[in-house]
Amino acid sequence: MNDTLQKLHNLCNTDLVGWEIAWCHYLELTHGRMGTFPALYTSDNDIVVTLSEDTLDKVRNILPDRPGHTVSQLMLVNEEEGIAFCLAVKDLENTPPLKLLNEAKFKKLIAEEEEPFKWAPGLL
């Protein structure tokens, strides 16, 4: 990843060619408690975020069967870099990018890893 894309504040006052604001989607467990428990990449515990609800449905189908729902949020997206930044943040200096999952990356992950995705721990 480009060094200038490490935090959201690095994009301030820069040319945003290649960036767009788009709806991104991720999965969360449904519960009545405080906190969020999203679907994660097993390899690094990053949140699974995608532009495609179809791809997200494929992720849901291989996760353990738990009550969950899709969350859709506007994000600043660079598909070429494969990253997105959530725009609903207060701390620009500490907001890292989220990896975008596309269909090609999904196919590669399921071919290479036995369990590429998991639910965030914390709810039984």
Image: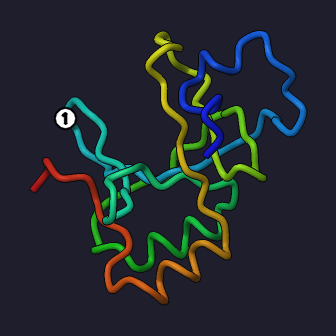
Which one is in front, 16 or 2?
2
From the image, which quarter does the C terminus lie in? bottom left
Q: Is residue 109 left or right of residue 4?
A: left
| Farthest front residue in view | 3
Compared to residue 63, the image places residue 37 above or below, namely above
What's the amino acid at mark 1? Arg
Q: Residue furthest right?
A: 17
Outermost residue on the left side: it is 124
On the image, the x and y values in percent for residue 6 come to 55, 31
At 63% from the left and 40% from the top, the residue drawn is 84
**Residue 20 x/y as whole percent:** 82, 35
Few, some or many residues within 10 Å of mark 1 (<14, 14–19, 20+):
few
Helix, strand or loop at disc 1? Answer: loop
Q: Is residue 74 left or right of residue 113?
A: right
Measured from the top left, where is residue 121 in percent x and y? 17, 52
Which residue is at a point 71% across and 42% down the rendered structure image?
23
Residue 90, compared with residue 98, is above or below; it is above
Q: Which residue is mark 1?
A: 33
The residue that appears at 65% across and 40% down in the rendered structure is 2
- Residue visible at 42% across and 49% down in the picture: 47
Q: How many marks?
A: 1
Q: Looking at the picture, does residue 94 appear above or below residue 104? A: above
